[in-house]
Amino acid sequence: MIPRYSRPEMVAIWSPETKFKIWYEIEAHACEAMANIGVIPRENADAVWKAKDVEFDVARIDEIEAVTKHDVIAFLTHLAEHVGSEEARFVHQGMTSSDVLDTCLNVQLVRSADILIKDMEALLAALKKRALEHKDTVRVGRSHGIHAEPTTMGLTFARFYAEMDRNMARLKLARAEIATGAISGAVGTFANIDPAIEEHVCAELGLTPEPISTQVIPRDRHAMFFATLGVIASSIENVATEIRHMQRTEVLEGAEFFSMGQKGSSAMPHKKNPVLTENLTGLARLVRSAVIPALENVALWHERDISHSSVERAIGPDCCVTLDFALARLTGVIDKMLVFPENMLDNMNKFPGLVMSQRVLLALTQAGVSREDAYSMVQRNALKVWEERLDFRELLLADAEVVAALGTEGVEEKFNMDYHTKHVDTIFKRVFGA
């Protein structure tokens, strides 16, 4: 997590100040619940709330931790400095450190997910806008990087919209799965704390009680969360890779917006490089790098160990902050992206008519020619287009066997571009609805 790839709202969720504020709220709500059921005196619970407006001193907590070698104890000691030792003597009663740490982590992940969901909404809006704008902008489709058949730029944007829409559904499920809390005490048996305390704390924090915790919340939930972020990152790279290809000089069907005063190269003034989408490819790698460690965190010893802790202290903020930045950056790229329809047609016509080969093949088989013979007839003409840049339609019209099977008008008719775009409306209805 570095400032260059960070946005303030997400960074704030993962700041030490926010973390300690959440720790405080967990402890204060727990005390309130204990007082409600008569476990501790009401005045002690009320005393804890005296610190509700306190900005906890991170440096002071670090100073205490340097002695205690325990972060939660250091925080509780600092809290008592504000509340008073006698008033704070029931704080953390029956609880264990993981009750605070795990519940706080999940609060942070839920809040992060809420920001990411807003990011996804903005990206989906940008993709839909560009899809509708270029619904009928014809470009060549490519398979293996080679010209295949005509498609439209609108379908390209719609495809990315559908992918991100699936990611939105995954993200909402991941948010729901991670939105649990645990205040169950040592090894999760509630021996020293009533389950009602957990229910109260979770309700106040917008969580649901973990059905069965050990001394930790099960890490399969976290694995699912980070795996979802990894999938979203891969989808970001999928879009970024397409744009990077489109911006290549010899393709130039689309490009990132190049602002006034922007420089592409320190050495070559003519350069316009796809730096934003290249950056997105790199950021996607960073987010995905957290997935395997998150999966490996699932297997812990017995009721708990802390092998997961150091991992989550890094990947929690790093993944959420990086993905937030990447989604916002991609939204900007899509929103301002330049599209060059003329270049799309020029590229498709570099090998004149070649993209209609399948249509001619199918017509020949429907006219009674065997598939093997039809393929041979089409391919011998197609290869001349590849090798000599001749016109595919003219070659077919000069091929006696092809004309005998299809007739001159039959050949001509196979080069109508509308044939390839006739179902665009149907696809758009599937993606965007009526």
Image: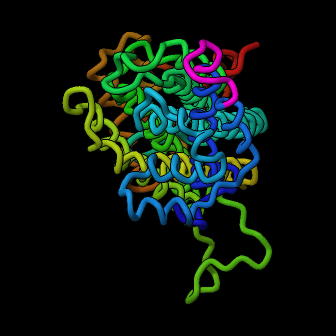
In magenta segment, residue 42: yes
Tell which of 239 and 17 is nearer to you: 17
Instruction: Provide residue 213's location: percent of width, then percent of height.
Output: 37, 20
- Judged left or right of residue 237, residue 429 is right
Tell which of 302 and 184 is nearer to you: 184
In magenta segment, residue 159: no
Q: Quadrant of the C terminus?
A: top right
Quarter occupied by residue 30: top right
Identify the residue at horizontal 63%, vertical 45% (top origin): 21
Identify the residue at horizontal 25%, vertical 26% (top origin): 303
Q: Residue furthest bottom?
A: 267
Identify the residue at horizontal 71%, vertical 31% (top origin): 46
Instruction: Provide residue 254's location: percent of width, then percent of height.
Output: 65, 54
Instruction: Provide residue 295's location: percent of width, then percent of height.
Output: 30, 35
Instruction: Provide residue 80's location: percent of width, then percent of height.
Output: 58, 48
Residue 398 shows in this picture:
no
- Where 206 falls versus 106 (above or below)? above
- Where 84 falls versus 44 (above or below)? below
Write down the region rendered in magenta. 34-43
- Where 335 falls versus 164 (above or below)? below
